[in-house]
Amino acid sequence: MKNLVDASHKVLMRIASIDVHAMPYSEAVHLAQTLRTLLNAHNHRYHVLDAPVVADNEYDRLFRALERIEAQYPDLIAPDSPTHRTGAAPLDRFERVRHPTALLSLGKAFDEAELEAWYERCLRGLRGRFGEDARPQMTVEPKMDGLAVALTYERGKLVLGATRGDGAEGENITSNVRTIPSIPLSIPVLPVSAEDSGGVVPPDRMEVRGEIYIRNRDFEKLNETAAAAGDKLYANPRNAAAGSVRQLDPSITASRPLSFMAYGTGPVEGIEAPPEGQHALLARLRAYGFRVSEHVARSDSIGEVKSLYEAWRRKREELDYEIDGLVVKIDRFDWQEALGFVSNAPRWAVACKFPAKEATTVLNDIKVSVGRTGVIKPEAVLEPVPVAGVIVSSATLHNEEYIRDRDIRIGDRVIVKRAGDVIPQVVKPIEEVRSGRERKWEMPVHCPVCGSELRTLPDEVDSYCASIDCPAQFIRLVEHFASRGAMDIEGLGAKLAVTLVEEGLVGNLADIYVLVAEQLIALDLFAEKRADNLLEGIEASKKRPLGRLVFGLGIRHVGRATAELLVARYASLDALSRVGAEEIEQIEGVGEVIAKSVESWFAVEANRELIRRLRESGVNTERLPEEAPQGLEDSGRATGKTFVLTGTLPTLGRKEAATRIKQAGGRVVGSVSSNTDYVVAGENPGSKRERATELGIAILDENQLLALLDE
Ligand code: IVH
């Protein structure tokens, strides 16, 4: 690897000063070969190992140098040149290709008992052949949920890419697979040095089998782009991968974020030291330069394999790609051969499937609910359907734009998805099965609970009810205020929040702190003991850290992390209530939208009154020592000082200046007041400088600032 870095930098220096046109042919031949090797190796590190060792712009410079040489000497263009991944012309149709040996499917196990039964069958077969103490090693791999393909390499060069098709015959997609960066055009990828290549020699001929897929994050981006362009959306990453691979124009495939993971081989000829089992084969494929799953396990205990299955069923969400199960394989190839095949599936492997995360059902209606900050959320009322082991009858539709982008209509058959603990969501309608009786939906104009007119803010997709008297909103707020991440009031959950508000006991958050036992017991649901417990919970919540209170107030856009940022800067609710948006915005991590939202929340008289009442009830409104910002006390020269930046600084940008001040322990605020220690003024400083002069505040230029910070 060090060789790769050194070699690249040497070549970068060299190409910085060469003139391609003046270069002798023999030198061009040599340099083109070196560049190709380096680019393939960097491509491999970036797309297969996720571990690049040069900067993007260095890669680009190497790439452009090769392009220039190839433009000057077209006969130097090799089929495996990294510059020629995307060059092929569009096709009229895909040619059919017959697979030399069929791409089989796998027998399935849907639970532990079926997995165990598969293992017992293997054991019986193996013990009959190899003796009673035969105990097979098993390889356990994630089952990639993508598109199966076969890639043929001749003397290390990619010559054919084919889809699985019906297993016997597929389609020739060579030009398309060439555009996928994690598919090596030649193997091994790394002949830069003996150390890097490990002396790997490619077989004379080999078919590599694996799965083309799209990572979840890439899929989301792809669909966002499609939605913005008004294009059709893909239902899931697998469909997106399949749709992208089966494009007649390779340049479209090239524009899609496809990846490839290898899990095996078809026919192989002329291979040195052939691997003796699946595990060794995967290691070999990795050495050739293929991406191979990093989650392959090996075990000779079916109990252990069952635990892996259970564990991955829960952990599948942690991966950035979709898996629909695990594949368990008997490791040794000679034992695989002994077990053989049944119809079109091997006896030596089994697909342990996970419950499907998606299902289709009918969207019976769309209703809206009011969230705690007044946001109106459209919700799908579904014909109940089991998804991943749970009956789903409602799902989120996010917002009006989501429904519009996907053209989701009432009465549609829709795809519903449930991933882990996430709320089920409607993915998209199946437009092909529409009857014509489906109805478009429109966002109501009035709040379904309080009837006041709904609003939308510019640049925001949500509609919301702006009425502070909206009971639905208030119930959600009480629930949020008492929730674990906020004031953590034991015993005050969603149900009780409804009762307290509907019975008129709580009409304002501060009312929570004046509840008495008699009132609670008078509500039928309360026994004396439970009332006492609740009151104890309320009492305990008075001592919560300030960050939790700020979060609990339900200020629009202020999540837990933002609340903590605010508290790190302002030591009390009082201090926070007095500052303007411009100053709040100076906090790193707090943007304009949040700052404005905080300012306008504190501007409402009823909210100020709420804070007064909370304080009077003994609720903590001061920052606790453990919430204080870390490490400021002992840091730089600007500790505790407040700065205002104005005008254009000659060399430092405003951002850079602010960062340096913060690093030295200072604060940067937006407006000049008597609390300001320094105003740093550049060119065209405007009124802030005047105000500083009026107030007698020290004015620094950039040099003076740097002197102050660095001294
Ligand atoms: S082995 C002879 N290993 O699952 C068995 N297949 O039903 C060859 N798949 O479409 C398949 N991940 O593309 C194997 N780690 C893995 C796999 C895997 C996904 C797909 C395969 C095929 C289907 C088999």
Image: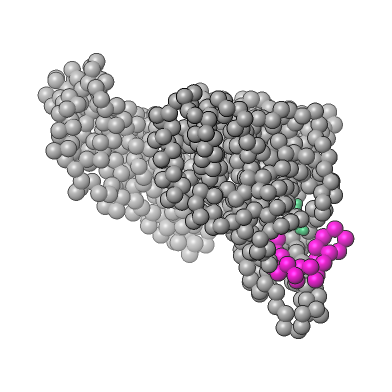
Query: Is residue 391 visible to the viewer in this orientation of the structure?
Result: no
Q: Is residue 169 visible?
A: yes
Quadrant containing the C terminus in the rendered view: top left
Residue ID at (80%, 78%): 129
Q: Which of 583 and 323 is in front in this view?
A: 323
- Residue 332 shown in magenta: yes
Name the quadrant containing residue 502.
Answer: top right
Viewer-proximal residue among 527 and 209: 209
Residue 273 percent across, percent down from the top left: 65, 64
**Which segment is the magenta one?**
323-347
Q: Where residue 109 appears, x then y in whole percent?
A: 76, 63
Residue 103 at x, y percent in the picture = 80, 53
Q: Position of residue 196 (x, y in %)?
A: 51, 53
Q: Residue at x 13, y 27 (%)?
A: 698
Q: Which residue lies furthest to the bottom in this view?
A: 132
Residue 679 located left or right of residue 90: left
**Numbered disc total:** 0
